[in-house]
Amino acid sequence: MFKQLKKTFNNPRQIMKVTKVNIDGTLNVSSASGGSINAIGTGTIDTWVYVQEGRILGVAADLPHSSIEV
């Protein structure tokens, strides 16, 4: 059980924006900080999705947000 819990914390779920739908069924997604990856799953361009371990988990709400630097 500890191994499962540890694995969960090592691979956090991220909210990323779909930037491109590839012909091989993958999506290019980018984070608010500028990083991008290819992920497996479904989505449409300019939507926010939950991504974990390179997989699309589902659509995330498109809520207003702001970034604060400390």
Image (spheres, rainbow, N blue to C red):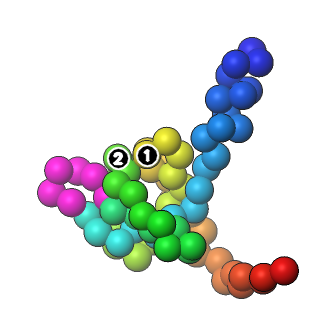
**Residue 1 is one of the magenta-drawn residues:** no
Amino acid bearing label 1:
Gly
Locate residue 46: give its quadrant: bottom left
Q: Secondary structure at mark 2?
A: strand
Q: Secondary structure at mark 1?
A: loop
Q: Earlier in the sequence, mark 2 or mark 1?
A: 2
Mark 1 burial class by Cα count in 10 Å: few <14, some 14-19, many 20+: some
Disc 2 to disc 1, C-alpha distance: 6 Å
From this viewpoint, which residue is outermost toward the right?
70
56 sits left or right of 4 in the view: left
Give the extent of the magenta segment.
Answer: 22-27
Identify the residue shown where x is 28% and y is 52%: 26
50 sits left or right of 64 in the view: left
Q: Which residue is mark 1?
A: 54
Identify the residue shown where x is 29% and y is 69%: 20
Q: Which residue is mark 2?
A: 40
Looking at the picture, how far across and down is residue 23, in whole percent? 15, 57
Q: Which numbered disc covers residue 10?
A: none
Looking at the picture, how far across and down is residue 11, in whole percent? 61, 41
From this viewpoint, which residue is outermost toward the front?
70
Looking at the picture, how far across and down is residue 1, in whole percent? 75, 15
Amino acid bearing label 2:
Ile
Q: Is residue 67 visible?
A: yes
Identify the residue shown where x is 51% and y is 52%: 51
- Above or below: residue 25 compared with residue 4: below
Looking at the picture, how far across and down is residue 10, in whole percent? 65, 38
